Image (spheres, rainbow, N blue to C red):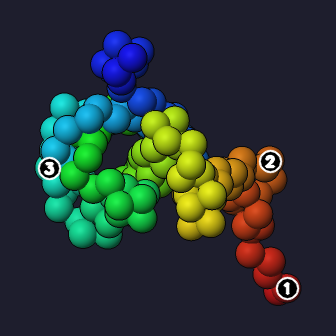
């Protein structure tokens, strides 16, 4: 059975803060499409975000083996980039379970659980209290 008979793509979901990325890997030439646009257009050409989202593919040595299709919602650009990275890493593990130790070792499979702390009553922000005046 070939891959096309059993499965057309590999998928992974990545989350970070309030961003959620649904990633699909198709066998291909290395195209990276985020929300219907190239990753360069979507992330505004910031080299840092390009490096972040392609890191799992680079470490696995599969840069030109897969076309990546991403749908990402919520959060800002940094959260979206980290969510995409986690989704790509999970999809790569779905494609080949043998690369899981490599992904784990580089920290690509660890979900960053930090979220924005809620504002509390009586405070200006989550922890910031009003300034105390002695006189």
Q: Nearer the viewer, residue 42 or 31?
A: 31
Report x, y in % for residue 32. 22, 45
- Splitting the image into 4 quarters, where does residue 49 fall? bottom left
The residue sitting at 44% across, 52% down in the picture is: 85
The residue sitting at 14% across, 49% down in the picture is: 41
Find residue 12 and name its label: none
Find residue 41 and name its label: 3
At numbered mark 2, what does the secondary structure look like: helix, strand or loop? loop
Label 1 sits on residue: 134
Report x, y in % for residue 36. 19, 32
Q: Nearer the viewer, mark 3 or mark 2?
A: 3
Query: Could you give the CA–CA distance between mark 2 and mark 1, rounded to whole angstroms?
Result: 22 Å
Q: Crowdedness of circle 3 by 10 Å Cα count: few (<14), some, many (20+)?
A: few
Q: Is residue 132 left or right of residue 59?
A: right
Q: Quadrant of the C terminus?
A: bottom right
First in sequence, mark 3 or 2: give its number.
3
First in sequence, mark 2 or 1: give its number.
2
Q: Crowdedness of circle 2 by 10 Å Cα count: few (<14), some, many (20+)?
A: few
Label 2 sits on residue: 121
């Amino acid at each position: 059975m070939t891959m096309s008979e059993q499965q057309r793509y590999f998928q992974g979901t990545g989350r970070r803060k309030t961003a959620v990325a649904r990633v699909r890997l198709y066998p291909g030439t290395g195209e990276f499409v985020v929300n219907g646009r190239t990753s360069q257009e979507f992330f505004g050409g910031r080299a840092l975000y390009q490096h972040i989202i392609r890191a799992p593919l680079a470490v696995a040595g599969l840069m030109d083996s897969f076309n990546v299709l991403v749908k990402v919602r919520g959060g800002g650009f940094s959260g979206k980039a980290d969510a995409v990275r986690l989704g790509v890493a999970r999809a790569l593990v779905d494609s080949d379970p043998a690369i899981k130790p490599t992904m784990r070792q580089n920290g690509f499979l660890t979900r960053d659980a930090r979220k924005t702390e809620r504002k509390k009553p009586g405070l200006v922000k989550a922890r910031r209290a009003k300034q105390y005046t002695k006189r």
